[in-house]
Image: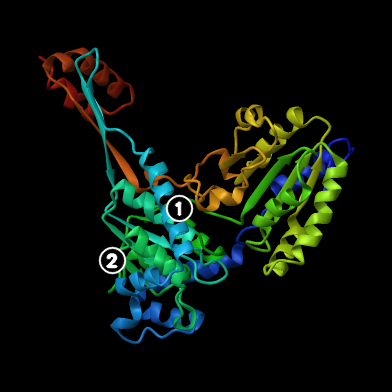
Amino acid sequence: MAMLATTQSDFEARFQRIVEARREADSEVAGQVADILRTVRLRGDAALVEYTQRFDGYALADEADWQIPQAACEAAYQALAPDLRAALELAARRIRAYHEAQLPQNRDFVDEAGVRLGAIWRPVDAAGLYVPGGRAAYPSSLLMNAIPARVAGVKRLAIVTPTPKGQANPLVLAAAHIAGVDEIWRIGGAQAVAALAYGTQRIRAVDVITGPGNAWVAEAKRQLYGVVGIDMVAGPSEILVIADGRNDPDWIAADLLSQAEHDPTSQSILITDDETFARQVEDCIDLQIGQLATARTARASWDAHGVIIIVEDLLREAPELANRLAAEHVEIALDDPEPYLHAIRHAGSVFLGRMTPEAVGDYVAGPNHVLPTGRRARFSSGLSVLDFMKRTSFLGLDEAAFAAIGPAAATLAHAEGLPAHARSVELRRR
């Protein structure tokens, strides 16, 4: 864990190294993924059979081995403990309500020149959702991906998920039932992303692929962007907590560890103006890690990537440091977080006040927890219904409207050296 103070002479150099540090796929992963994508594109189902046996120890021997039936999803849902079923249903309701409010409106109007202008929003025909099946088998992620797609109006939702040794996560199946998923294929990894993008003999291609995965899955999505749409290229999880000394250090330690336990490459950062409090948080983290079932992962993450930054003036310094980090999650654990909310321009999602831990946002708050990482919050946003929709613009001119704006189009076409463009306008002039 690194502890920095803005008063240190070498602070800027040390902080810039943190900003620029990359914790994502290397060139070796990129090469391996390219080989897998090429093989699936050429060999289809046969390649999926071989990769699934090799990586998951599962044989796709006959038709029944390929898919998990919807009846199994319903059975998993019915078998849930009542409190767990209620929690998943609450999460689904809140996610659905939040994303319904995101639906864009069509436009159709006539401007002052008499030109009819507008746009129609339509869902994509099919979406593919990647659901991890190894270290991170999360039903919450399935809800966060599938529900916005349904709200957008997507008709076909196809899930791919690895089932090591044939074992499927029952919570994931129950979430698939709640979300109304159409297909669940027992394949994972970069090969599953390739199958969704290119299509195979059994699996029909989709238009958009979303969902979290390991470095190979993220790299496959990156390489296939353009063949299909993707949500984002997601890297390791991140949390930045801005907190003063009036917080309970145990709370803040737990918040930092909530991301550290995801993966050894996750990053947790604390910015505070109270060095004594910072030391207390550090001690609490050491105590809490020993009590976690995820201790090995959390310890590796905190030791390698954890950061505590001491500032002199929290309001003056923390927002600008936060903007340079452009973190996935930003907690503002203060009595008055509002000035920070408006000063922080780059963040995937912001959590306001002492009683808003990031973990609530992961499950039941409503906003999507699929968020940009690796400083991509500078130019991108979290998953929304718009990721499953596209906009078609339209325009219409009558003779009067054409007379008003047509000549200018011809003039610009000539200026650009495109005479056929100009002629298509000029032939209509009278």
Classify the position of the N terminus by image quarter.
Answer: bottom right
Residue 340 showing in the rendered view: yes
**In the rendered image, the vertical position of residue 83 relative to residue 229, given as above or below:** below
Assign a secondary structure to mark 1. helix
Percent from the top left, x then y, of residue 118? 25, 28
* Left-right relation of 128 to 363: left
Q: Residues within 10 Å of mark 2 (few under 14, many from 20)?
A: some
Residue 223 showing in the rendered view: no
- N-terminal of the pair, mark 2 or mark 1, is 1
Residue at 54% across, 72% down: 134
Displayed quadrant of residue 393? top left
Residue at 12% across, 21% down: 428
Percent from the top left, x then y, of residue 384? 42, 45
The three-letter code of the residue at mark 2 reads Arg
Q: Which residue bears the numbered disc 1?
A: 91
User: Which one is in front in this view, the residue at disc 2 or the one at disc 1?
Assistant: 1
Q: Which residue bears the numbered disc 2?
A: 204
Q: Residue furthest front?
A: 82
The three-letter code of the residue at mark 1 reads Ala
Q: Which of the pair 122/366 is nearer the observer?
A: 366
* Left-right relation of 310 to 220: right
Assign a secondary structure to mark 2. loop
Displayed quadrant of residue 265? bottom right
